[in-house]
Image (tube, helix red, strand yellow):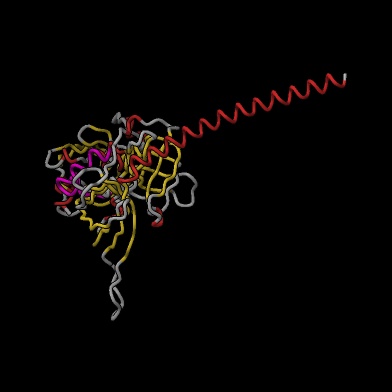
Amino acid sequence: MEDFFRLVSRDTVQAEEGEVRTVAAGDEALLDAYSQAVTEAVEAVGPSVVHLEVEYSPHRRQAAGRPRQQAQGSGSGFIVTPDGFVLTNSHVVHNASRIGVILSDGRRNEGELIGDDPDTDLAVVQIHAPDLALASLGDSRSLRVGQLVIAIGNPYGFQSTVTTGVVSSLGRSLRSQTGRLIDNVIQTDAALNPGSSGGPLVTSRGEVIGVNTAIILGAQGLCFAIPINTARYIVPRLINEGRIRRSYLGLGGQSVPLARRVVRFYELPVESGVQVTAVEEDSPAKKAGLLERDLIVAFDGQAVSSIDDLLRLLSEERIGVQSQLTIIRGAEKLNLTVIPEDRQNAA
């Protein structure tokens, strides 16, 4: 009987060891496939990633007799055209007095700021150098939550740093430094640090599907990227015009709830609107007769429930076009005629 138990125990141990070895072999194959996917993606995109060394003109007054100090910063970018156009973040190069560009092979170039759009946090810099490696751009609409992504950048000056993670969420909104919301932002847990901004977010196929732009300080794994499809729209316009044209009304406002009786009486499709807090002199809003404390509820027939709704509707196509601003003034509903202007010309 004891021999029987020893035999059974030995056979059981051998069976368990065999199962462990089989499971370990399966895990090893999965890890090898994962490593290979990351390696191949980095080899495909890595040569196009650049390190940006930026100097900014000082804005603050210096103490008498002291030399004016140049503020400095750094970031990342990646080459998207054979003639040396580099895509990066606006906050990396905005108001730069000098942009140094270091290629992945160590070559150094002076970069020229071609255009930037703080509202989407995208910018284009150009360098002149031969034999440039280009990044392959993908389609950010094809992304799925949980999909493997790879971030490449130069955090704290450590060149060509690679981190991996997954797409944590899609369709996020992120507020830019100008106050506008950037729509359809990609959330990922691929680690980013200062200096990673402007670098590419890459799929396992080696296609860029985002521009790394922001982290939540003090949080773990909350990182964001601008979709590459947004960049596809913005970049040609920055190259051609140096900026993105948007329309302008010349008002300050805040989102506020509407009185329920007003919503019911006028059968409004929204329960909140934009209360006007300021109207600039000689602005389209002033010319239209808009007053402080007016409540904007629609623009050209489109419901407006927040200041972000209004900003989204003020696109390039609205510049110089006669439009209708629907407001509540006191207990009265009014339609004002307004002609939005080009924001830069109005400034």
Front residue of this view, candidates 295 and 235: 235
Query: In this rendering, is residue 57 above or below 88?
Result: below
Q: Position of residue 267 (x, y in %)?
A: 30, 28
Is residue 242 on the magenta stretch?
Answer: yes
Taking the image as shown, residue 193 lies to the left or right of residue 110, namely right
Residue lying at 45% horizontally and 39% vertically, measured from the top left: 165
Q: Is residue 276 visible?
A: no
Is residue 40 on the magenta stretch?
Answer: no
**Residue found at the very far bottom of the displayed protein:** 65
Taking the image as shown, residue 264 lies to the left or right of residue 114, namely right
Q: Quadrant of residue 264?
A: top left
Q: Quadrant of residue 255?
A: top left
Give the magenta part as a residue range: 230-252
Location of the C terminus by quadrant is bottom left
Q: Position of residue 183 (x, y in %)?
A: 32, 39
Residue lying at 23% horizontally and 51% vertically, measured from the top left: 125
Q: Position of residue 35 (x, y in %)?
A: 46, 37
The count of marks equals 0
Residue lying at 14% horizontally and 42% vertically, measured from the top left: 319
Q: Is residue 24 visible?
A: yes
Location of the N terminus by quadrant is top right
Taking the image as shown, residue 75 lies to the left or right of residue 219, namely left
Q: Position of residue 37 (x, y in %)?
A: 42, 35
Front residue of this view, candidates 104 and 195: 104
Front residue of this view, candidates 236 and 246: 236
